[in-house]
Amino acid sequence: MDDASAPGTISARRKEKEDALKRSTKWFLGAAIAVGTFGAGTGAVLASGGADEAEDGAETPITGTELDQASAAALDHLGEGRVSDTEVGDEEGYYEVEVTLDDGSEVDVHLDAEFTVLGTEAEGADEESGTDD
């Protein structure tokens, strides 16, 4: 063993300090990355409206084949009209389909996740009716 690498020499102590500094730097960088990732994820949730969009009035429309099935169920139940708006995660059911009737009035049709009609609600009505309307 040469004198430069012998324990207690200046070179050996310098190497120990450098190794300790490298370990500290790795821990610091790891912690910074973790905090940054958490912060970015939290920021994305907040920017997208948070976990519960219903609180701020935002609605998620029905899309794809679910839109076709929900629209067909609502129109079949009412027997007339056209779909004017939809929402997933409605407070009265899994889906809500707003239908504009032939006379211009609007009715919300509430459906469960299997597209079964739970009830209807005329625009401006205070109470929801049953499925036998």
Image (cartoon, grey):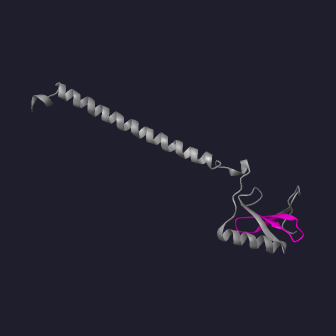
Residue 22 position by quadrant? top left
Q: In this picture, is 22 found above or below 96? A: above
Does residue 46 belong to the magenta stretch? no
Q: Quadrant of the C terminus?
A: bottom right
Where residue 36 appears, x then y in whole percent? 48, 41
Where residue 127 appears, x then y in whole percent? 87, 57
Find the residue positioned furthest to the front.
104
Q: Which residues are magenta?
A: 94-119
Q: In this picture, is 46 found above or below 66? A: above
Find the residue positioned furthest to the left.
2
Where residue 10 appears, x then y in whole percent? 18, 25
Where residue 47 appears, x then y in whole percent? 62, 47
| Residue at x 73% of width, y 69% of height | 70
Residue 87 position by quadrant? bottom right
| Residue at x 65% of width, y 48% of height | 49
| Residue at x 22% of width, y 28% of height | 14
Does residue 104 belong to the magenta stretch? yes
